[in-house]
Amino acid sequence: MNFLFAVFSQAGRNLLQTWRTQILSLMTITLSVLIFSFFYLVYTNALQAGEQLGDDLRLIVYLDEEAVPALQEQYREKILKFDRVERIEFISSLQAFNRFKDQLDEDQDILADIPQDFLPPSIEVYPVRSLDALSRIKRFSDYLQTLPGVIKVQYGREWVERFYTFIELLRIVVILSGSLLVLTTTFMMAHSIRLTLFTRQKELELLHLVGASNSYIRMPFFLEGGLLGLFGSLAGIAALYLLFNWTQLRFAGSALLGMFSFNFFPLPVIAMIIAMAIILCACGSFSSTRKILSR
Amino acid sequence: MDTTGNNNQVMVDLTRVTRTFPPDVQALVDVSLQVNRGELLFLTGMSGAGKTTLLRLISGIEKPTKGYVEVSGMDLSKISRARLQKLRRLIGVAYQDFKLLPERTVAQNIAVSMEVAYRSRLFIRKQTRDLLAQLHIVDKHNTRADKLSRGEQQRVALARAVANKPDLILADEPTGNLDAESTELVMDLFHRCNESGTTILIATHDSSIYNRPDSRIVTLDCGRIVATKQDADKDTSEPVQYGPETLFTDCLKLLDKDTSEPVQYEPDGEES
Ligand SMILES: Nc1ncnc2c1ncn2[C@@H]1O[C@H](COP(=O)(O)OP(=O)(O)O)[C@@H](O)[C@H]1O
Ligand SMILES: [Mg+2]
């Protein structure tokens, strides 16, 4: 009880003494959390969008002749040897013709004179809907091309590749902004501790003289760092939430938003980001105070 | 005097302690001193004799170049940081330069020594009020330390040293800035603490406070113990002579002499 009181009153006193730097630290942490969580939000939403679009993602492998059931089994085996897939469908010439006919709808009569096997038979491969699968799709296509009896492999190449580079880029940006968050928080903490050491030099010296324990001296800094992390990240997340809602309202009804559903972080992710900021700041501030003990 | 090193009885035990400062200042030379629990001891000697250095060695701020310093049975060179911190919480030190925090109030300054020992709010408030009353500075409770006179600052420093009810009090020139009346208050406080069992070491050159017959007086000169005046009914460890011709001891002359030779006792009033 007395210990807690001592820690809190020390921390409070220090916050009062150095509030200017503390506000600066708080703003830096808020900004870093905002930047990081912004990119992270875009990233998670892009992943979700990728999975929604994955429905249209398939490789069409055109064959030079109809595959009999025994051959179908061979193809299936060879495809599965490369990667897990969600579904493999064999389309005969006739099925392809019928599909085409259905698509033509009212103009079906133009097909009247055309033989029913004018379209080649094919295999439709639906890869597992994941980013990993996306990243391998080109290699998958190259592999399928080497199978016997394959004339051509088709897939939404351009779209997939663009989307994939976009996701990759986002991933890098998320990692970079995450490192920025780590760097700025630890730097700000080290900076504010240095300032505190400067303004409280006499007091810390006296504390050593009257026999203050290490925890008496360091716990307030730990608490202070934790509080900065808490409020900084709360403010950052709140700012992002406002920004998110604003964009939702601003672009409501636009085509892009109509296609995908954008979601804010679920609570556990918010809790994780806040916890991360608290731990980072508390530990940053705690470890910067090692200096004052080794005097 | 107890020379068997019985640690239960001995609060402070210095064994052949030498402290030199670069380049070649000999602040203390081969000093051996035992202070029993419950003792009130005066440390005298002119400015630069090594009184402050001796007190700093006892509180562990300074380390001896040679020799051993034991406090409460613990060798200061061997104990862990945590033990030293704990020990310091049991030692109240009133520094010669006060070491008050200028922008804190008197009450906050006094509270520091009790806060680091995790004393309760109630205890801290009560002790602060009591001590301020005893030292006649109750009205300064909420005054910033840098707005006080030297004499008031000195009393606040003293109150802080005494506040946590330490086992050992080290006071460095505690009456240096005080008038006769305040000196009397301060000495009364020391005697009350001493009566309740606290060991007290007072470094001073104020002859008016140690011209009492009931305490041991150890005199330092140029870092050496040159004289010890003991309580009348106990043995004196070294013969003490009073002579008018040694009003001011010449350091150089002393160093030339054989130091085992008893040196005449004369309190100096050099320091201002
Ligand atoms: N940190 C130090 N560095 C160098 N010399 C010092 C230091 N502390 C004390 N001294 C020297 O040691 C001697 C004893 O000083 P001190 O213990 O302060 O004497 P006193 O308190 O009796 O006046 C003096 O000559 C002083 O100059
Ligand atoms: Mg001195």
Image (cartoon, helix red, strand yellow):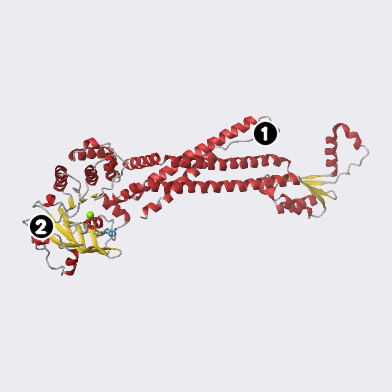
Amino acid beneath label 1: Leu
Percent of width and height locating residue A102: 83, 35
Percent of width and height locating residue A284: 46, 48
Q: Quadrant of ligand 1?
A: bottom left
Mark 2 crowd level (few <14, some 14–19, many ≥20, 10 Å Cα): many
Residue B230 tag number: 2
Picture mark count: 2
Asked if the residues shown at circle 2 and circle 1 are in contact, with their CB atoms under 8 angstroms apart, the answer is no
Secondary structure of the residue carrying numbered label 1: helix
Percent of width and height locating residue A114: 92, 40
Q: Nearer the viewer, mark 2 or mark 1?
A: 2
Q: CA distance from mark 2 to mark 1?
A: 95 Å
Front position in the image: B171 or A141: B171
In the image, B191: left or right of B23?
Answer: left
Percent of width and height locating residue A226: 44, 43
In the image, A22: left or right of B34?
Answer: right
Residue A257 tag number: 1
